[in-house]
């Protein structure tokens, strides 16, 4: 295992652990998801560079586009949740209530 692969695997694992164990605020969960997506994007881009193929150059950009869309939807949900509930704490959210 190369050192770059180990670093980006560790980044993804730390984002996953942060998402699993530190789920108190919606903003912290969104930041962990963004860190995981960034680790996937960078490792996928490095994999494409190591392959020296131009056929696989567009999937990392497509992944980055979906990551930006996910971030914008997450921030919109954060604003809507904060306006309706007054806080972004996940414990105060009741999904069964409209």
Image (spheres, helix red, strand yellow):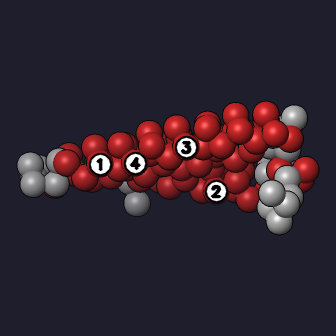
Q: Residue at x 25, y 52 (%)?
A: 59
In the picture of the structure, the residue carrying the numbered disc 3 is 73
The numbered dot on residue 66 is 4
Q: Nearer the viewer, mark 2 or mark 1?
A: 1
Q: Position of residue 45 (x, y in %)?
A: 29, 46
Residue at mark 4 to residue at mark 1: CA–CA distance: 6 Å
Examine the rendering and report whether any part of residue 17 can be seen. Answer: yes
Q: Nearer the viewer, mark 3 or mark 2?
A: 3
Specify which label sits upstream in the sequence, 3 or 1. Answer: 1
Q: Residue at x 90, y 50 (%)?
A: 92
Specify which label sits upstream in the sequence, 3 or 4. Answer: 4
Which of the 4 image quadrants contains residue 21?
A: bottom right
In the picture of the structure, the residue carrying the numbered disc 1 is 62
Q: Secondary structure at mark 2?
A: helix
Q: Residue at x 52, y 38 (%)?
A: 72
Most extreme residue toward the front, as rendered? 98
In this picture, residue 42 sits left or right of residue 15: left
Q: Residue at x 16, y 54 (%)?
A: 56
Residue at mark 4 to residue at mark 2: CA–CA distance: 19 Å
Q: Nearer the viewer, mark 3 or mark 1?
A: 3
Q: Position of residue 61 (x, y in %)?
A: 28, 43
Q: Nearer the viewer, mark 3 or mark 4?
A: 3
In this picture, residue 65 sits left or right of residue 59: right
Specify which label sits upstream in the sequence, 4 or 2. Answer: 2
The numbered dot on residue 16 is 2
Q: Quadrant of the C terminus?
A: bottom right
Residue at mark 3 to residue at mark 1: CA–CA distance: 17 Å
């Amino acid at each position: 295992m190369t050192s770059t692969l180990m670093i980006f695997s560790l980044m993804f694992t730390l984002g996953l652990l942060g998402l699993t164990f530190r789920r108190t605020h919606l903003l912290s969960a969104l930041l962990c998801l963004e860190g995981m997506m960034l680790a996937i994007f960078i490792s996928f881009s490095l994999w494409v560079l190591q392959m020296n193929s131009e056929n696989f150059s567009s999937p990392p950009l497509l992944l980055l586009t979906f990551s930006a869309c996910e971030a914008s939807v997450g921030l919109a949900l954060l604003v809507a949740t904060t306006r309706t509930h007054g806080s972004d704490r996940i414990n105060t959210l009741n999904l069964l209530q409209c």
